[in-house]
Amino acid sequence: MQIRLALPSDLPAVRDRLRAVFGPQRAEHRMDPVSQLIKAVISARTYDEVAWAAFIRLRAAFPNWATLTLADPAQIEPVIDPVTFAEDKARRLPILIRVIILKRGELNLDFLKDEPLDEAMEWLTRLPGVGVKAAAATLNFSTLARPVLTVDTHVQRVGGRLGLTPRGGDRTLAYDGLMEQAPADWDADRFFELHWLLKAHGQSICSHFDPACDLCALRDACPRIGVGRDQEGDVVAFRGPRTLPGEEAGI
């Protein structure tokens, strides 16, 4: 069970520094929770632009999500391809929808708006194919607008290097660690903004390979956990033009 500790947090300072670089991040549009859950499930280990395109095609093919229960996985897979593990996701989506209808009597997740946050997360993560990332995204990004942080690969990596989360590959531990440190008065919009700021930072500066530590807005406070000196990139603010074939590349 998640326990939010009443301790000072570094997260507001991290958010403020990253906001100065990437600008404010606001939720311009929130989908209904079932749509957000489906989007989160097909997005796993997939680039955002690929996942969004797949989701739009899936929505066009199945305007009523309940019709997914009657769909053969062979019908779904070519629609969502090339998301990662398209075959597995195509098989799990009809099962996911059937289970929600079986448990609730209808395809509706609005009841999660009034459930205690821990119980809402637990209910979602019991669904087939739904992990802590997809559950948090459903609660925070959708019209439910619950105060919970979505921890993806980038958020987990940045949190680990800052020493805010345990090292290792356990997404649930990273989620628990960050939620314990979040101010108790943060609303859904603040968690939404922190997610997208950490994600942008992880994609552009604190990347998996060759993190650009010299350009990092957090460099004076970051212990660089897990980052070796030989891993840091030789970074300049602007790269020169690409060389012609046969010349030595300066990139």
Image (cartoon, grey):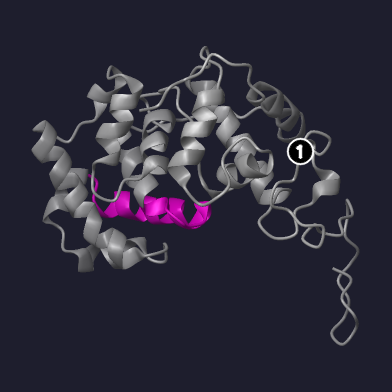
Q: Main secondary structure of the magenta part?
A: helix
* Residue 199 belongs to the span the image colors magenta: no
Could you say where residue 39 lies in the image, as x and y percent from the top left?
Answer: 37, 46
Residue at 52% across, 56% down: 47
Question: Where's the N terminus, which quadrant?
Answer: top left
Indicate left or right for 63 with 248 as reference.
left
In this rendered view, identify the residue nearer to me: 208 or 67.
Answer: 208
Q: Quadrant of residue 87?
A: bottom left
Instruction: Note whether residue 150 is visible.
Output: no
Q: Residue under circle 1?
A: 222
Relative to the observer, which residue lies in front, 156 or 66? 156
Q: Residue at x 63, y 38 (%)?
A: 198
Question: For the magenta stretch, what is the residue range?
Answer: 42-64
Circle count:
1
Q: Residue at x 37, y 26 (%)?
A: 143
Q: State left or right for residue 178 relative to residue 102.
A: right
- In the rendering, at what x and y percent does residue 210 appear? 75, 59
Looking at the picture, does residue 240 appear above or below residue 236?
Answer: below
The location of residue 35, given as percent across then percent down, is 31, 40
